[in-house]
Image: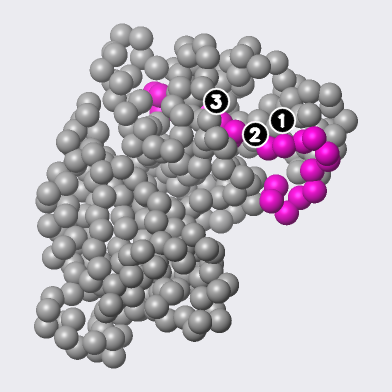
Amino acid sequence: MATVTPLFGFWPHVTGAVAHRLLADRPSRLITWSTLDDLLTIAGRHDGDLLVVFPETWEPDRLRLDWATADPPPGVSLGRTVTAVAADLLLDALADETVLLEAGDGRGISDIVAHQIEQADTIVLADLPDDDPWEADRLRVLLHRLAPWAAVLTTADTHPPAVAHRPVPLTPVTRGLRGRPVGLHEPLPVNGVVSSVFKARRPFHPERLHAALDDVLDQVLRSRGHLWLASRPDLVMSWESAATPRLAPASVWLAGLSDEEWQTVHAERRIAADLDWDPYYGDRHHHLAFIGFDLDPVRLHRTLTACLLTDEELSRGEAGWRHLPDPFHQGVDRAETGDATG
């Protein structure tokens, strides 16, 4: 039996340090990533576990997708994914708008670092300040808020806990549509870190939401989830921000599907929709999480609520909503509409 432990991280010197720490806990063969075929060949011939270090721009869910369609040798399994994080560089990276050309898909430094953290089963924090315990605690709390489903460790931890690993990707949109949390609602600051979840049924007025983006993202380090715009009532829109906001069509709402199409949707999403079905809106709703320092959750919720349709606007119905001005068509979208499988 061989377990493949993938190790991700944006900073090679930190990833290397974490790799040596993991090897001390669990002897494995250390290799660097080339291709999945090469990895499976090595795993099939090697009698023991493997620790695989991935390039800086790789994200855990990309490996999960590739692994799901691969044919691993008997006895070879994908273990927990680990992300190495540099304590002294994390905050600057989450605010870095630089687009990396080598990524080849428009992702920036902030996107990659946020995704590597959120998609990990285990996060290992390295280079913590020895002379500033408050700052060290603040970074630990921040990582717990960014990835509440992951174990957060430091290189000083001697016995990493066993955690369940995700065999398939679970994006924020998928989490939300299947009734899972996209973040924690912890509106009271802990070491200055605030996490706030916004949920509502009424659609957003696209023009008001666009105009309010600066206010919505004030003091926000990371946000994610899904929403719907009155001008596009059929579409689930994915929402995320690190250094910059991203809004894109991700799926369709089940309210517009036929009975035959409904049966093609993932069972967990169908159950979540049934449990939370609204007589007027169907399964359409917003589910957003915001994480930041000194974030004012009351002001944030008031700002977002003011972007929802008013009673008068709501009374116009979908035919009227579709004609509302939609500035998001010009600037923020970056993806095509996905399917409804959720």
Q: Residues within 10 Å of mark 2 (few under 14, many from 20)?
A: many
Which label's residue is closer to the chain start, 1 or 3?
1
SS type, badge 1: strand
* Tag 2 near tag 1, CB within 8 Å: yes
- Disc sitting over residue 74 in the figure: none
Q: Amino acid at mark 2?
A: Gly
Q: Residue at x 51, y 51 (%)?
A: 170
Q: Residue 239: percent from the left, percent from the top?
A: 37, 59
Q: Is residue 3 above or below residue 166?
A: above
Q: Residue 309: percent from the left, percent from the top?
A: 18, 74
Q: CA distance from mark 1 to mark 3?
A: 14 Å
Is 50 magenta? The answer is no
Which label's residue is closer to the chain start, 3 or 2?
2
Q: Residues within 10 Å of mark 1 (few under 14, many from 20)?
A: some
- Disc sitting over residue 162 in the figure: 3
Q: CA distance from mark 3 to mark 2?
A: 11 Å
Q: Nearer the viewer, residue 214 or 287?
A: 287
Horizontal side, residue 252 vs residue 103: left or right: left
Q: Residue 305: percent from the left, percent from the top?
A: 16, 63
| Residue 70 visible here | yes
Q: Quick one: quadrant of the N terminus?
A: top right
Q: Residues within 10 Å of mark 3 (few under 14, many from 20)?
A: few
- Magenta stretch bounds: 66-89
Horizontal side, residue 206 vs residue 9: left or right: left
Q: Quadrant of residue 135?
A: top left
SS type, badge 2: loop
- Disc sitting over residue 3 in the figure: 1
Horizontal side, residue 243 vs residue 26: left or right: left
